[in-house]
Structures are given as structure tokens and as C-alpha cells.
Amino acid sequence: MTTLNEQELTIHCGKTTNSFEELRSLCEQHSNELKLQLNISAHEKVIVRFWTEDFPELICIGTFEKNDLGKTTFTLDFSESTL
């Protein structure tokens, strides 16, 4: 049986006055940078909450994990956004 190890991080980017498209782009940029810096192993998952800088509004939740080829991948879920 494998255990899933999960970590959580928070990133603040953009402002509530930015358009949703701008915030989405910022989250993708930060995610692409972060996936190169994360050192995660198989069966490990990192959850990243993206918040605006000025007033804390949730933009999205990112999930980072290793795929079958050993590369770190991510998905961004904007469905829980509070904007």
C-alpha cells in the first residue's frame, strides 16, 4: 500500500483589480517556475493556493505531482475562486 504525502504552499500574485485573464496568466507563470524548483518524489503531492496580494481573494488551487515519466506536472483549478 502506498501513502500519499501532501504538502501545502501559498503564493500571492496580482491584485483584485486585475482581470481574471491576467490573474490566470500570473498563476500559470508562477506554476511553470515552481514546477522547475519543486523536488517532489513519486506519490507526493503539493497543493498550492494562489491568492491576490492586495485583498485576500482565492484565485485558484494548483496541484503539483510527478507523472509516470518522472516529470513534475501541475493542474490549476479555478472553480473554487472567490473572485
Image: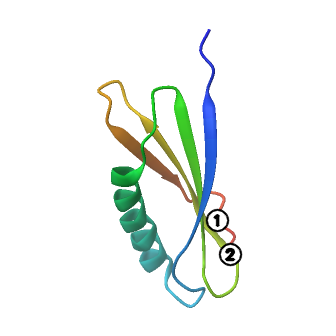
What residue is shown with label 1? Answer: 81
Report helix, strand or loop for mark 1. loop
- Identify the residue shown where x is 56% and y is 59%: 78
Amino acid tagged 1: Ser
Question: Against 5, is 35 above or below?
Answer: below
Residue at x 43%, y 75% (from the top left corner): 21
Callouts 2 and 1 close, C-beta under 8 Å = yes
x then y, percent, for residue 18: 51, 87
Would residue 70 appear left or right of 9 to someone viewing this image? left
Q: Is residue 36 above or below residue 10?
A: above
Q: Residues within 10 Å of mark 2 (few under 14, many from 20)?
A: some
x 36%, y 67%: residue: 29
Q: For the residues marked 2 and 1, what is the alpha-carbon distance in whole angstroms?
A: 8 Å
Which image quarter holds the N terminus?
Answer: top right
The image's mark for residue 57 is 2
The x, y position of residue 47, in whole percent, is 59, 48
Which corner quadrant of the image does residue 70 belong to? top left
